[in-house]
Image: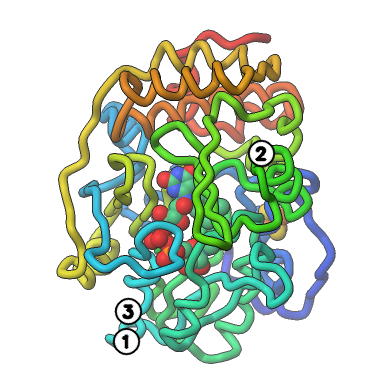
Amino acid sequence: MTSVDSSKHKKAKALKPTSRRPAKELCSECGLCDTYYIHYVKEACAFINQQIGELEEQAHRRSRNLDNPDELYFGVHQDMIAAQKQQPIAGAQWTGIVSTIAIEMLNRGLVEGVVCVQNTKEDRFQPMPIIARTPEEILAARVNKPTLSPNLSVLEQVEKSGMKRLLVIGVGCQIQALRAVEKQLGLEKLYVLGTPCVDNVNRAGLQKFLETTSRSPETVVHYEFMQDFRVHFKHEDGSTETVPFFGLKTNQLKDVFAPSCMSCFDYVNSLADLVVGYMGAPFGWQWIVVRNNTGKEMLDLVQDQLNTQPVMSKGNRKEAVQQSIPAYDKGVTLPMWAAKLMGVVIERIGPKGLEYARFSIDSHFTRNYLYVKRNHPEKLEEHVPEFARRIVGQYKLPE
Ligand code: FAD
Ligand code: SF4
């Protein structure tokens, strides 16, 4: 089934259970179930009804070509580039391309509102989804809230406000549910600006991650797993701390990631019109995937504010991925000196550009495939999309 049956919509408004999460422990708290659209949850939820192929056809008019190696990995697209804002937005996650596109769309009247996520007053990492109607509100939503965020919880307000043109910024699981209910929102035009997403956590999990990994967890304002195989923490005083991936305390962190993220195969946000991440770009650059004409229209709005270069690919990830599978499975943690050394070596000779993105996708898909197989064997067949099976099939997995 491609999307939801509109005849149910009226009935859905009468229902409004707020505490149900039919995906149970696999729920990513996308927010759909906080609205009357919960009525559609069995069809719309990314963790109950995996339907990426069908929704690709709905959003992009075709599903990905599995025989095209780039589409197999990165989904339907007409273009990929690396980019930086000529004048980065201070305090953005990277250079602020996402916030800039959203502001341009609002200023030029293409949309009346933007679904994005600010943080609460008390806690910089506690997400607070909003419908922004001014550039200031969009700017206040810049930088990742690296926690599960109920972005779709504001969907009811969209319909009530009478808005007809909307931009939604979100990660893959949020966008899959959004696409499934898109036709029920009463919009003339929906624009979707996605980011890749992986290894998200709830707020308690984030605290554990910060406490096990950073020298000063309470002053972290921003972090990212970067293309140089290090986690980069930025602190309140402006200092940067880096920790090599291979030095992470895998044994303590194994249960930190949300079960939804351990079962996700939509790392690259297949259903967004335009995707802005970093992992397919050289270190320091953002990676942009234009999936369809709507995505191109969005990117064109900011082209004159960007430095760009073609995407590149270097190295061979396969051996590193194969070796990391049993190491992660057994929770192997290297001593810090060895982790640093390995980090330096792999940064010199390791995969770069699109090959780094493939490295990250392979590592996460193999791990997640094993997770689903072991913890939700009854879901394995339907939940893992064909493109992910092909990717995982390149490796030898433990039982
Ligand atoms: P900014 O201009 O700073 O804007 C950031 C936008 O993100 C804001 O509009 C805000 O509404 C939105 N946002 C913040 N937190 C959340 C959230 N929890 N859920 C949904 N939307 C949110 N890119 C990769 O290439 N590889 C990854 O593995 C990867 N993992 C990510 C994990 C998470 C949880 C998130 C939110 C993003 C991830 N990204 C990843 C994307 C990347 O980190 C940047 O967000 C992206 O490159 C945009 O940077 P920017 O400076 O243009 O964004
Ligand atoms: Fe509902 Fe979203 Fe959780 Fe699925 S992931 S159960 S749609 S809140």
What residue is shown with label 3? Answer: 105
Three-letter amino acid code at disc 2?
A: Thr
Three-letter amino acid code at disc 3?
A: Met
**What residue is shown at x 82% (from left), y 70% (from top)?**
17
Label 2, residues with CA under 10 Å away: few <14, some 14-19, many ≥20? some
- Is residue 317 something that shows in the picture? yes
Three-letter amino acid code at disc 1?
A: Asn
**What residue is shown at x 26% (from left), y 30% (from top)?**
68
Cα distance in 3D space between marks 3 and 1? 6 Å
Horizontal placement of 303 versus 89: left or right?
A: left
| Number of marks | 3
| Label 3 vs label 2, nearer the camera | 2
- Name the residue nearer the viewer: 375 or 280: 280
Asked whether disc 3 touches disc 1, contact meaning CB atoms under 8 Å apart, the reply is yes
Label 3, residues with CA under 10 Å away: few <14, some 14-19, many ≥20? many
Quarter of the figure with residue 235 = bottom right
Cα distance in 3D space between marks 1 and 2? 41 Å
**What residue is shown at x 71% (from left), y 68% (from top)?**
123
Q: Is residue 362 above or below residue 200?
A: above
**What residue is shown at x 76% (from left), y 34% (from top)?**
255
Horizontal placement of 177 versus 191: left or right?
A: right
Q: Where in the figure is residue 387, as x and y percent of width and height?
A: 43, 30
What residue is shown with label 1? Answer: 107
Q: Where in the figure is residue 91, as x and y percent of width and height?
A: 45, 67
- Name the residue nearer the viewer: 183 or 276: 276
Specify the label residue 213 is tagged with.
2
Label 1, residues with CA under 10 Å away: few <14, some 14-19, many ≥20? some
